[in-house]
Image (cartoon, helix red, strand yellow):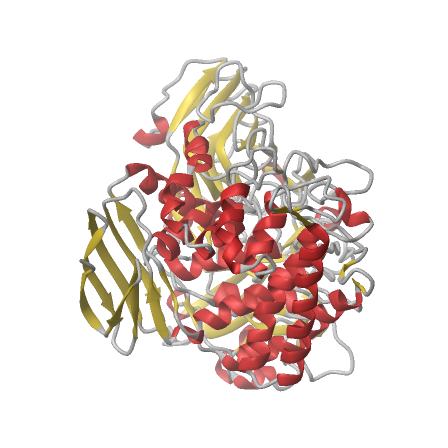
């Protein structure tokens, strides 16, 4: 292999760091690609198992008479790929899906091409047995299909060359479901393989393994190809903040910010603790020169530990980094770039460096932030700075948990769970307005339904997991979408799945009690300390009573969901199912109230034995209306003030606040944010999964205040399905002034209010074509498009 000159490698590094200068234009695939076999073939590396861990490089030379104005290609791979054109990184994917709905990207690469010889290069990897939990896979493969006849010279077939990159091996210090990390030996790496000057004489011809097939065109399928339905992920430069600790050698701690190389002398063992300043999801990029036979270990964590316990997240004294690790072995060459195959989640990165006979120069270390390209179009401001900080941290939490799917948490699992996703999707709608990731999530859960009829709890996923209550939240999520978007055809496509979910629960109703009986699988509700995880039934987060059936929480959650389902059936003319499930809803509510109401406590028990009481049962009693409306406010007062009840944690407080709002006590919302203030007080820069001690420091279900600041404090909600009209019912509580904006399909809804002596004044602005009402303390004002003056006195 020829080694690239120093100048060429420097140019490559500049292109890597500034790759967003030439962005590929996302394009639309030709309609012909969905109607029959593709002429391009899936290709793989011959003589190698397509099922085992490995990293491959594919190349093809493409000669053009001139730079084209447009050159659209369609690309996909299994497990993952990263595309380069003439040495420049272009895009990566495919968007995570399932084998029977396998995504391909459509991009216009014309700006990366030039007259003469062009090199199209693709890195493809398969994590094999260490494939992440959310990553479905069939076998190693790559496919590129030109959009029209002018681009078909790029089609993958045996004219492509391939090389198995044996410099990679898996680091098995991996975290739960995110897959393995990387060990890379630079002396075996084909440096410059993406460029025209690289000599690929010893590469082999790729092996075709079948044509590309979209849905409906074959007698049998490998991957069922579908066009990507979300945008490409954001990737932007993120400089690291500071070196907090340096052991084994005293060097310049400012090299991260001064952009000056850091030289580690020979025969040194050095440890550098780098603090990003906040949690992030990014591709770390380490650029080094020299250092032959040295090793650099990069370990990533959310917080430092002492005896496996976290403390204030800024604290580093007598604490160690425990986490996922990559290892890079330099070969002595100039400007060697290490970048892991998949992004890392970190606040802290520790570099453990060992040099041998040669010094090692660290030329640069930075991150490339990545995530779904949400924008902060909506906003919230008020006279209490605490809420601004909660907004900032909450929005960061939501962003880190949104990539090609929603994530429960980016560090440990990166799995899309229904319970988390319902909350995340509402945050997305209210802050950005982009509904594409929400649509994708709804579809994915619909595809996940098993022979039983219910959805899986998380999807995409290689390991099936069933949490029946999450199937109910999927129905609520479809209802959320129906209320916020005028998209009847999409909702219609979900109705058959809703019926199978409801039918599964209906079969589990005990005819003698009128409540749900025994439910199989993991009936997770929340993570209070009274429902701990153990290796015997019940599993953690599930009330013990679900084993024998008769759970008021699960029964009333079913009733709560039936209310939404009946709305949908009525709206789409299915009066049979609307009436059927309204009748069942009434039975569930009546039976649960009769069996589980404790007259002395004036609360619902978790079962008819009345030996366990929780906030959860009474929250669902309010949301389902099983508890009569006239009693609901008094019940809420009790459930919110009695510490002897099993308490809702961060996740279930989303439903606590829905109940607060329903009973007319939403003016208290701002005063109930102590759990989020407590998280800020221990240095969290994202919101955690649970109260301390918590596993995950970043869990999207805990970001719900971002939604509530707009939907509850500003009070902006759909008044009618499809958000065809708006209801604005603010609840300032102790605040004196608020300002906010919510993106709507027609434009921005803006609100600015001041409160004095319980009276409101201000302005509400609606986009053209949107009307609605402003409600406050019994007053109802009509809202028109444009600026509306608000005076409630």
Q: Residue at x 32, y 42 (%)?
A: 388
Q: In this view, does 575 lie above or below 243?
A: below
Answer with the quarter of the image where residue 189 lies.
top right
Q: Is residue 175 above or below residue 692?
A: below
Towards the viewer: 607 or 143? 607
State left or right for residue 363 relative to residue 410: left
Answer with the quarter of the image where residue 416 lies.
bottom right
Q: How far from the left and from the top, in percent, is residue 699? A: 53, 44
Q: How far from the left and from the top, in percent, is residue 705? A: 42, 47
Asked whether residue 214 is in view, the answer is: no
Q: Which residue is drawn at 33% across and 32% down?
A: 259
Q: Residue at x 40, y 43 (%)?
A: 10
Q: In this view, does 538 lie above or below 83?
A: above
State left or right for residue 621 relative to residue 196: right
Asked whether residue 259 is in view, the answer is: yes
Q: How far from the left and from the top, in percent, is residue 224? A: 68, 73
């Amino acid at each position: 292999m020829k080694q690239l000159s120093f100048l060429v490698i420097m140019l490559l590094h500049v292109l890597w760091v500034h790759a967003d200068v030439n962005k590929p234009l996302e394009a639309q695939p030709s309609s012909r690609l969905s109607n029959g076999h593709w002429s391009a073939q899936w290709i793989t590396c011959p003589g190698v198992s397509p099922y085992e861990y490995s990293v491959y490089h594919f190349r093809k030379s493409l000669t053009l008479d001139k730079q084209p104005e447009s050159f659209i290609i369609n690309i996909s791979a299994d497990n993952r790929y990263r595309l380069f054109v003439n040495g420049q990184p272009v895009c990566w994917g495919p968007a995570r899906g399932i084998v029977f709905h396998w995504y391909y990207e459509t991009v216009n690469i014309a700006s990366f091409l030039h007259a003469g010889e062009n090199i199209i290069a693709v890195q493809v990897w398969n994590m094999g047995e260490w494939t992440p939990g959310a990553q479905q896979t069939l076998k190693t493969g790559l496919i590129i299909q030109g959009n029209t006849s002018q681009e078909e010279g790029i089609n993958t077939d045996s004219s492509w060359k391939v090389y198995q990159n044996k410099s990679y091996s898996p680091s098995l210090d991996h975290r739960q479901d995110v897959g393995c990390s990387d060990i890379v030996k630079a002396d075996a790496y084909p440096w410059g393989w993406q460029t025209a000057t690289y000599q690929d004489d010893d590469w082999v011809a790729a092996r075709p393994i079948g044509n590309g097939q979209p849905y409906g065109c074959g007698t049998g399928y490998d991957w069922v190809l579908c066009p990507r339905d979300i945008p490409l992920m954001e990737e932007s430069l993120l400089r690291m903040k500071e070196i907090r600790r340096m052991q084994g050698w005293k060097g310049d701690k400012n090299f991260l910010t001064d952009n000056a190389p850091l030289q580690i002398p020979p025969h040194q063992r050095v440890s550098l603790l780098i603090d990003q300043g906040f949690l992030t999801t990014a591709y770390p990029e380490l650029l080094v020169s020299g250092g032959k036979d040295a090793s650099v270990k990069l370990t990533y964590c959310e917080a430092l530990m002492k005896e496996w316990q976290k403390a204030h997240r800024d604290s580093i004294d007598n604490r160690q980094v425990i986490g996922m690790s990559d290892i890079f072995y330099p070969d002595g060459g100039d400007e060697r770039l290490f970048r892991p195959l998949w992004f890392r989640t970190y606040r802290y990165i520790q570099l453990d460096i060992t040099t041998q006979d040669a010094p090692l120069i660290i030329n640069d270390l930075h991150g490339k932030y990545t995530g779904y390209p949400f924008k902060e179009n909506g906003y919230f401001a008020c006279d209490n700075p605490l809420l601004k900080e909660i907004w900032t941290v909450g929005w960061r939490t939501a962003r880190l948990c949104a990539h090609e799917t929603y994530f429960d948490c980016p560090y440990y699992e990166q799995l899309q769970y229904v319970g988390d996703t319902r909350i995340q999707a509402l945050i997305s709608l209210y802050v950005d307005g982009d509904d594409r990731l929400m649509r994708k999530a709804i579809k994915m859960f619909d595809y996940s339904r098993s022979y039983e009829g219910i959805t899986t709890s998380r999807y995409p996923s290689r390991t099936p997991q069933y949490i029946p209550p999450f199937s109910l939240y999927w129905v609520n999520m479809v209802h959320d979408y129906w209320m916020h978007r005028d998209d009847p055809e999409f909702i219609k496509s979900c109705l058959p799945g809703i019926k199978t979910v409801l039918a599964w629960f209906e079969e589990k109703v005990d005819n003698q009690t009128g409540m749900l009986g025994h439910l199989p699988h993991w009936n997770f509700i929340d993570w209070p300390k009274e429902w701990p995880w153990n290796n015997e039934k019940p599993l953690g987060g599930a009330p013990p009573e679900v084993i024998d059936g008769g759970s008021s929480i699960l029964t009333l959650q079913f009733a709560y969901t039936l209310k939404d389902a009946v709305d949908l059936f009525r709206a789409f003319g299915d009066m049979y199912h609307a009436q059927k499930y309204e009748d069942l809803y009434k039975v569930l509510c009546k039976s649960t109230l009769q069996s589980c109401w404790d007259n002395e406590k004036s609360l619902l028990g978790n079962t008819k034995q009345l030996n366990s009481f929780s906030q959860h049962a009474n929250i669902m009693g309010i949301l389902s209306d099983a508890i009569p409306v006239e009693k609901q406010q008094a019940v809420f007062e009790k459930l919110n003030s009695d510490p002897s009840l099993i308490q809702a944690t961060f996740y279930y407080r989303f439903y606590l606040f829905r109940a607060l709002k329903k009973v007319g006590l939403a003016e208290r919302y701002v005063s109930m944010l102590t759990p989020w203030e407590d998280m800020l007080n221990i240095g969290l820069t994202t919101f955690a999964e649970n109260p301390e001690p918590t596993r995950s420091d970043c869990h999207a279900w805990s970001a719900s205040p971002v939604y509530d600041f707009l939907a509850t404090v500003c009070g902006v909600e759909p008044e009618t399905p499809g958000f065809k009209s708006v209801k604005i019912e603010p609840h300032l509580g102790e605040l004196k002034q608020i300002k906010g904006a919510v993106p709507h399909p027609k434009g921005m809804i803006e609100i600015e209010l001041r409160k004095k002596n319980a009276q409101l004044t201000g302005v509400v602005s609606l986009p053209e074509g949107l009307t609605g009402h402003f409600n406050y303390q019994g007053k109802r004002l009509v809202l028109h498009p444009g600026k509306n003056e608000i005076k409630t006195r």
